Image (cartoon, helix red, strand yellow):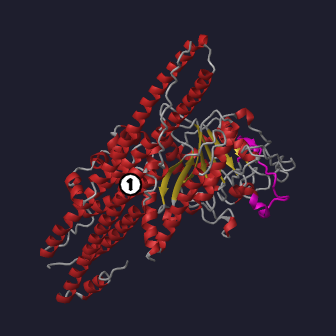
Amino acid sequence: MQVVPLSVGRAARSWDEQHLDVAAAAGQIGAAPTGGFTDAVAGAAARFVATWERHVSALADQAEACADGLRSALEDYLRTDQAADQDQLALLGLLHEIR
Amino acid sequence: MTRVITPPPVPRAVPPLVVEPGELRTMAADLLAASAQVDDLGSFVAGAARIGDWEGVASAAYHQAIRPTGRCADAMSLALRHVARRVDQHADTMQELVERRWTLEDERAHLVDTIGALRGEAAGAFLVAAEALQAACDDCALRVRRFEADLDTWVTEVIAEEEGMREAFARVLTLDQVDQRYADVEDPADAALAAAPGTGSTPAEVNAWWGGLTQGQQRAILAASPGSIGNRDGIPPGARDAANTVALDRDLAEWGFLEDRGLLTADEERWLENARAAHDARRAIEQGIDPVDREPIPSQLYRYDPTAFDGDGAVAVSAGDLATADNVAVVVPGFGTDGASAAYHGERVLSLYEASRILDSRQANASMFWIGYDAPDNAPWSGGWDAAGVIDEDLATRGGDRLADTIDGLRATRDGDPAHLTVIGHSYGSTTLGHGAHDSGVPADDLVFVGSPGVGGDTDHASDLGLDTAHVWAGANSRDPIANLGNHGWWHLESALGGAGLGDDPTEEAFGARRFEAESATRAANDGFGALADHSKYFDHDTESLYNIGQVVNGRYGAVREAGPVTDPWYAEPRDPEWGRAPGAPDTDGRP
């Protein structure tokens, strides 16, 4: 790693936000009502909703993995590079997942 | 000699059709809102997730690694959006099939009655009548055959529609299917949004751009970027409502999710409160029943931004269809208003809608509350009152500009089919309305000021508001202490303190507006701040105020019950001729 700017840490935070937003969307799909269909369609609708809740949850997990990956990169940088103290202090705050 | 009569066959029964189109639309809205969220992830990967000032091997690996996530999100968003649209279309089709089923049921019942009658006649028929009876039976048999053909068509269509819906679900069930069908497919919203008029464009230009898009492009924008059109003046009310509904559903899901996990920030808590209030306002209106046709009242979410004004929120919700109503009323609330008070204002515009319908059942109406400006928080009833001089006109000045833009936008969407449009300012909202009309021009047919603490320091006369004074109306309960804050006569806060206060009382004779009766049957015995409740009764049912506002909204000026203005002789206190009049309670809701 040549340079780890603060923007890497900030991007990790943004991925965390995306993770939460997409996880909420997965929940919304899972909670979508399927009781309004006729009997002939209700089963297909229920299957679609359950399957897509999993698809979108997996997408949310990918976002979280991106956030974690960026934080790992930051940790590696802090362990191996004795950069200026000031930079380190600024970066330390970005190492932890807020939510 | 006997004659054999061949009776017509009994038609088949109509199969049941159990379906809930309303529930289907709810599902479609949920899927559409989720697709918007997934689309945001795709946009994020293509934009903000890229770290331009990070170089090296790790950077290259990161940017390489996130690409599939973005591609997948884009494809999933498109797939979800298409299924959501298909479910919406399914709801419409099934609704139509349900209605056709009712018709078939009626037809069958009529045929069964006719056949029963013919059989009864056949049992006792004389030879001379047999020929006519057989002819009637043959005619009925023909109608039965037609009915059966219609029934076959209906059954075929139900089956085809159900099959089509099942296929739509099955077509994108796996991610491989999604990838094959939607990966690298250009989102029709992208090109359409790229051609959108820039900031500073007029509502008419925005309206022309929107009208020039294909339906597919419009639908794509609603799903992919609801925020870009939901609050844009010049976009038609139906499209704004659809976009804001997507945004509202998404926000409720997102912040509700965080709330359940204890992860809401303080800001998000306020935004969620605003979102829930908008939802409640809309639900309260839609649970109303039109007093004339007994149908549920439609509503439109015309503006929705729960984060606006430093978290106070902006929201506008209508009772009735703004795009088609003969009469449109826009209510501008005042002190203490923010997004969280939306449900309260929803009830007010519901009352105004009901009143205007009761007062003239031949006209279609829409009433909307507009919380589109940052109103003063220090309402006297919430403990923050600190004299009128402290509350200045800055917020009203800025709010007036926004109000003028909003009314311009409404007008632009009804070009060639203009509604009769009335803007009603209540409390500090009347100051905002005064500024909007005076400073920017509000293209309304009528302006109404109720419970006004002043119409703004620059407006000295109704003729300053850009309308014929015959269309400038004012109502004030004689006990209302807020309405008594306006300037009277030649000596007042503004003249004594160099611009303090909120301007002139619009019910005063010198102002030149048409005052209408606005007393309440439950008004306080005395004035002063003990009578503060009278400031909040102008939109209550069976009040003089709501009755007269409803008549103005309907353009029935002759039916407005006018009142004498406040006078302020130089040698005495202001005199209100309404003080001693016994208030009436005209019917505004059709209920005893």
As helix, strand or loop, the secondary structure at mark 1 comes to helix
At a point 17% along the width and 88% down the height, the residue shown is A80
Q: Which residue is mark 1?
A: B32
Q: Is residue B469 above or below residue B502?
A: above
Residue B568: x and y in percent read 80, 49
In depth, the one of B273 and B394 nearer the eye is: B273
Residue B106 coordinates in the image, percent (x, y): 55, 33
Residue type at mark 1? Leu
Q: Which residues are magenta?
A: B506-533
> In this orientation, which residue lies closer to the viewer: B195 or A13?
A13
- Left/right of residue B260 with respect to residue B370 in the rendered view: left
Confirm whether residue B456 shows in the render.
Answer: no
Secondary structure mostly seen in magenta is loop
In percent of width and height, residue A90 lies at 30, 83
Query: Which quadrant, please, contains the N terminus of chain B?
Result: top right
Q: Indicate yes or no whether the magenta region holds residue B254.
A: no
In the displayed structure, would residue B150 be above or below residue B347? above
Query: Which of B302 and A57 lies nearest the eye of the viewer?
Result: A57
Point out residue B432 in the picture as x, y percentages from the top left corner.
59, 52
Residue sticking out furthest to the front: B1
Q: Residue at x 77, y 63 (%)?
A: B529
Dot 1: chain letter: B
The residue that appears at 49% across and 38% down in the rendered structure is B13
Is B123 left or right of A17, judged from the image as shown? right
Q: Residue furthest left?
A: B57
As drawn, is B223 to the left or to the right of B484?
A: left
Mark 1 burial class by Cα count in 10 Å: few <14, some 14-19, many 20+: many
